[in-house]
Image (cartoon, grey):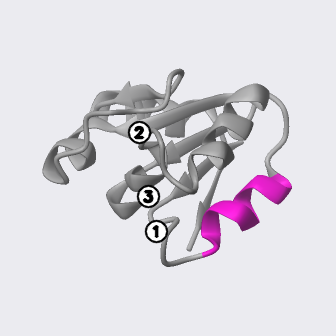
Amino acid sequence: MLHTLNKSPFSHTSLENCLRFIKPDDVLLLLEDGVYAATRGTSRSHLIEQALQNGHVFAMQADLKARGLTDLIDGVQLADYDKFVELLEQHSSHAWR
């Protein structure tokens, strides 16, 4: 399953809710303000590190760039729009809001 998350982990509980349901080999795609979760050294970094133990975590490159984020947690992969479409084609999806 592809889980998409577009809310900041600092103002919403969507990431925690998602991680309770994510299964091994699921994919988490961070987009819009959700990309803040991919930043290294924050109070929420451990949540993404946990997700990386079970599956793949992607962050939308354009959203990272728009927010000036560059210091990402090791293992977080960058996704462009082509990769986003590819993930949608390969997986059923659930949007966490």
Kind of residue at disc 2: Ala
Name which residue type carries label 1. Answer: Lys
Q: Find disc 1 in the rendering and name its residue.
A: 7
Q: Is residue 26 left or right of residue 4?
A: right
Calculate the distance from the C-alpha at mark 2 to the C-alpha at mark 1.
13 Å
| Residues marked 3 and 2 touching at CB (< 8 Å) | yes
Residue at 70% over, 38% down: 51
Q: Is residue 50 above or below residue 95?
A: above
Q: Amino acid at mark 3?
A: Gly
Residue 36 picture location, percent across and down: 39, 54
The picture places residue 76, in percent across and down from the top left corner, at: 49, 28
Q: Image check: 83 left or right of 46?
A: left
Question: Callout 3: few (<14), some (14-19), or many (20+) C-alpha neighbours within 10 Å?
Answer: many
Q: Residue at x 26, y 44 (%)?
A: 64
Task: Return the disc, 2 or 1, that comes first in the chain's sequence.
Answer: 1
Calculate the distance from the C-alpha at mark 1 to the C-alpha at mark 3. Answer: 5 Å
Cα distance in 3D space between marks 3 and 2: 8 Å
- Whether residue 20 sits left or right of residue 43 in the image: it is right
The location of residue 71, given as percent across then percent down, is 32, 33
Q: Which residues are magenta?
A: 13-21
Q: Which residue is more in the foreground, 82 or 27?
A: 27
Q: Which mark is residue 34?
A: 3
Element on which disc 3 rests: helix
Rendered position, 82 above or below 64: above
Question: What residue sits right under mark 2 in the picture?
Answer: 59
Q: Main secondary structure of the magenta part?
A: helix
